[in-house]
Amino acid sequence: MVAISDDFILENHISIKKVKMYCQYIGNDIVGLAYHGITIITPVMAVELRARLMDYCKPSKDLDMLVEILDESISTRNYIIHFGV
């Protein structure tokens, strides 16, 4: 479990909001993170989210942690579960 700063998520909400993810359960598509509740990110979604973050976010410790999580999801083909902002 890793905690990413709420400020980082809010500051980068526009770029995150462009990526399709699942809300509460697989098949319930949303665009961006579920602000309240659970977001499920598949390895395929992690690839797109990683690309968006690298293109639009300023370098930071939070970005490094998030990219590390996304890279692990991609390489191990595991899903990421996000528990709200």
Image: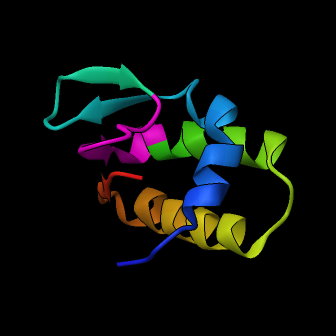
Closer to the camera in the image, 16 or 73: 16
Q: Position of residue 53 (x, y in %)?
A: 70, 46
Residue in the picture at 16% in, 38% down: 24
Q: Which residue occupies the extreme left position in the image?
A: 25
Q: Choose between 74 and 51: the one closer to the eye.
A: 51
Does 68 lie within the magenta span? no
- Whether residue 42 appears in magenta in the rendering, the answer is yes
Answer yes or no: is residue 51 visible. Answer: no
Residue at point 46%, 63% (across, down): 75
Rendering coords of residue 48 (x, y %)? 57, 36
Look at the picture and state if 17 lies above or below 52. Answer: above
- Estimate the x, y position of residue 41 in percent, counting from the top left: 35, 45
79 vs 20: above or below: below
Report the span colored magenta: 32-45
Residue at position x 66%, y 57% from top?
8
38 lies left or right of 69: left
Front residue of 27/4: it is 4
Q: Position of residue 12 (x, y in %)?
A: 69, 43
In the displayed structure image, the side of residue 18 where residue 45 appears, left or right: left
User: Which colour style is shown?
Assistant: rainbow
Q: Relative to 84, is 24 on the left or the right?
A: left
Instruction: Using residue 80 as the reference point, say whether residue 52 is left or right of it.
Output: right
Asked whether residue 14 appears in the rendered view, the answer is yes
Label total for image: 0
Quadrant showing the N terminus = bottom left
